[in-house]
Amino acid sequence: MRRFLLNGVVCQEDDDAFDDLLSRAYRAKVRPHCLCCDPPVPMYIAHIGDQLIVKRMPLSGGIHGPGCPSYEPPYELSGLGPLMGSAIKLDTSAGTASLRLNFSLSKLGTTSKSGETSEAPDSVRADGKKLSLRALLHLLWHESGLTEWTARWTGKRHWWQVYHHLSEAAELMEVRGERLTDRLFIPEPFRTDDKATIEQRRAQRLADLFQASNGSKKLMVLIGEIKDFSDARNGRQVVIKHMPGFRLFLDDPAWRLLRRRFETELMLWQASDTPHLMAIMTIGGSPAGITTIHEIALMVVTEQWLPIENAFEQRLVERIARSPAKSVKGLRFNLARSQPLANATLLEASPLPCALYIVPPDAGEEFEAALNVMIDARPDLASWIWRVSDGEMPSLPI
């Protein structure tokens, strides 16, 4: 159970007076401190739905104590490590993260080519200096806590929670001095009874996209779950769940490129009814009311909304999702697929938290050498390795 210092009072989450203390601190804009270690770790209070929740500050999970529920595995075990300090810069006093992006949030006149897919996941151009479109989605997923799981949450994570946690995470991020939320649209959970009100809010948020302009035109980032890629003349209409009646146009060259670069993601999605196919895209509009996709990246998540990048990870995540022990799914961000990462970490493994590594069947000597370096660099973590070429998945240390 977490212990906090709230407005000068030491308390923990199951205290009778905790909710009242939390409400007072929220109204007074007082920052709580987690007492998992010394010195205490600053946190913040989020208002999600009708609840107040104490959350860790952006990218601060590594400074919490290993036994704290707010602790996260070392960032060096995932693609997040190389981004810190370059693509992501923290302002600890303000509690915000400033992001550098390698994709544009504007286009000039009518000369920009719409429908480009994001840089290929294994592209050599992607580096740690800027966030790719996929890396931004991974960052939001990570900071939303959507990479964390325990079987005790089974049946309790739905689009409502995903929407609110993503929105809350984006509130603490900036791009070129502008709040990320000013350029981000995530469809709110759709309810037939509130159809007119929801569509009005959506129209207001996207209104600037359809204004005529002779100069630079604003683009927005949209994150949503793909429902369908339906046929359209000279392209595809992309249908997003919770946005009924709203269509996004993707031209034929971009559709062909999307299928090639995200072939694995599309196959995982089509192979079963349970995964969700998430998309992050930059979108623009015309005065005629047509919404076009300029750049797009895809990510598959399980029915628990945990990201997976291949069938091997899917098997691993499905196995650990049945455990009541807490786990954290690792994300690739800008890392190429040819580089190793901790695919997941079991935080409650004994005697040490355990990083789980998958060695794919096509891995070579360089992959194995890089993996050994990662493992040797973290003696504070146990390691578990599944070399797929050797056969079935080994037993997990849980």
Image: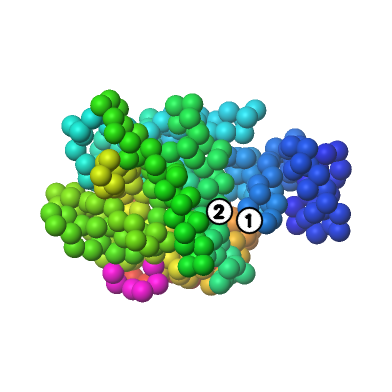
Residue stretch rendered in magenta on the structure: 270-275
In the rendered view of the protein, which quadrant contains the C terminus? bottom right
Q: Are marks 1 and 2 in contact (CB under 8 Å)?
A: yes
Which residue is located at x 69 percent, y 55 percent? 51
Magenta-highlighted stretch: main secondary structure? Answer: loop
Q: Write down the residue under mark 2.
A: 164
**Residue 224, x across and y down, in percent:** 40, 55
State the count of labels: 2
Residue flagged by tag 2: what amino acid is it?
His
Residue flagged by tag 1: what amino acid is it?
Gly
The image quadrant of residue 187 is bottom left
- Earlier residue among tags 1 and 2: 1
The image quadrant of residue 228 is bottom left
Local crowd size for mark 1, using a 10 Å CA cut-off: few (<14), some (14–19), many (≥20): few
Local crowd size for mark 2, using a 10 Å CA cut-off: few (<14), some (14–19), many (≥20): some
Question: Does the stretch in magenta take in 352?
Answer: no
**Residue 334, x across and y down, in percent:** 36, 42
Which residue is located at x 49 percent, y 40 percent? 181
- In three-dimensional space, the C-alpha distance between marks 1 and 2, rounded to whole angstroms, equals 7 Å
Of residues 14 and 398, the one nearer the viewer is 14
Whether residue 273 can be seen here: yes
Badge number at residue 49: 1
Residue 255 against residue 62 in the figure, above or below:
below
Q: Is residue 4 left or right of residue 152?
A: right
